[in-house]
Amino acid sequence: MIEELFFLLVFPGMTFQVVCGLGFEWLDRKLLAMFQRRVGPPWYQPLADMIKLFSKEDLLPKGANEMVAAFLPLLSLSAVLTAGLYIPIAGFSPVSFEGDLIVILFLMSVPTLAYYVAGIVSVGIYSILGGGRSLLQFFSYEVPLLIALSGPAILARSWSVSGVMSAQAGLGPFILFQPLGFVLAMVGLIGKLKRDPLDIPKAKSEVVGGSLTEFTGAKLAFWHLVMNVQAIVGIFLLVNLFLAWPQMLHPLLTAGIFLAQCLIMILILSTTSSVFARLRIDQLAGLGWRILVPLALLQVAVVILMGV
Amino acid sequence: MLKNVIEKTYRWAQKNSLWVIHFNTGGCNGCDIEILDLLTPRYDVERLGIIAQGSPRHADVLLCTGPVTKQTRDGLWQIYTQMPSPKYVVAVGSCSNTGGVFNGSDTVLGGVDKLLPVDVYIPGCPCRPEAIINALLTLRERITSGDKI
């Protein structure tokens, strides 16, 4: 009982992921600042932002549905935290079952849909525009992402993350067999996190703040936390599916390798967001359906041929 | 005791995370360019936790530039009321302080303090970016000792 509560609330669960999420935000902003030759924020910046948002007044425009608007960020946060619970951290997975990859992918798409509904219930022209854009973006990146992530599962003949990892212990990291799948999954992850080249739903110069334009106070703080935890869960998932290292080593060494892999992923994400300019929504839809989906299908075909 | 700790934490967080929104109430664009300088690598106010926000709902500090004209008066009031409290107003530049050279015109009300409670005034035409950073640092001190929370 106490062990389960510890799993749920402390180590692979809530506390660990929230701390990792805040750390991710700081590292991301610091790296972006370094690419732009700035100093960047101090390490406690995400924490200060969050506490400040909690201390602020909670406002919503007239006509907005207060109950639903307060429920949506909590729903998204619980969904991503639950998804993170099933992802092995450096090979350590207390709760794991056959098929948890599908559950993780489902839970990680909950925040996008909640983001859309948040745009509708907080009446404001920019919120509604941002919500609609987020749904359009969802249809463009989600299909290639799902196909790309099913590649490792098909190769390992197992739909659980631990199963994929143990298959990689025998065959070697799956990025060697599916580099294309890894790139597609990265693009999909950037789209899911609404990060810079694909930040169409929350583009500041076009739709002010997207769905979150009218959100203030604690609700906004929870939304920021959802984005950060989603990023960290996505990074853990990709590292486990494509870059898993043999698990026979000393646990500390395994943890160090896992940490280094996550840092490299964060570096890739920050570099892409500082190098590329934002796409238009029609360009993203074209990219998703004309280029990414055929490439992902090609990757899956290669994987199936390899399996035979 | 606990209330004291919470209040101190809130003040620390508010001090270290000032999100600003910038509104031109009818100025000549001179001070606006100086505000943009703040975000560039040379002055980089993100190291003090200051970020420019697009939506007034996310902002703590309203940076006003230019004299308040009759046309922008309603817009300024609307933006100020949309911000969640605790909120602060900084009058950037001479026009924003007093109306500047436009004071006395038929279409100009005067400085921002004719309409909103101003926390910090920055003189200058246009004021230098260092002066704006100094004003924001003054505002941080006011948050540590002030009455708004």
Image: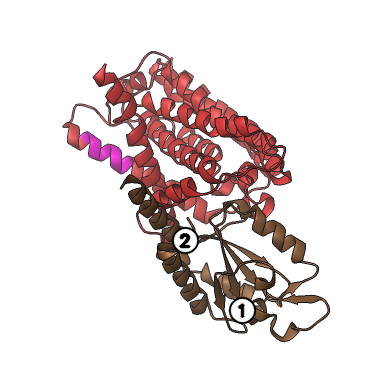
Chain colours: A red, B brown
Three-letter amino acid code of the residue under disc 1: Gly
| Vertical comparison of B15 with B135: above or below | above
**Can you see residue B55?**
no
Residue A27 in the image: x percent, y percent?
Answer: 38, 51
For the image, the number of numbered tags is 2
Q: Which residue is mark 1?
A: B93
Residue type indicated by callout 2: Asp
Q: Was residue A291 drawn as part of the magenta stretch in this picture?
A: no
Q: Residue A124, image x and y in percent?
A: 71, 43
In magenta, the rendered stretch is A254-261
Q: Main secondary structure of the magenta part?
A: helix
- Assign a secondary structure to mark 2: loop
Give the quarter of the figure containing the N terminus of chain A: top left
In the picture, the quarter occupied by the C terminus of chain A is: top left
Q: Nearer the viewer, residue B25 or A147?
A: B25
Q: Which mark is residue B147?
A: 2
Towards the viewer: B69 or A207: B69
Asked whether residue B105 is in view, the answer is yes
Q: Earlier in the sequence, mark 2 or mark 1?
A: 1
For residue B100, what is the image quadrant? bottom right
Question: Is B127 above or below relative to A85?
Answer: below
Residue A277's spot in the image, x, y percent? 59, 54
- Between marks 2 and 1, how big is the CA–CA gap? 26 Å
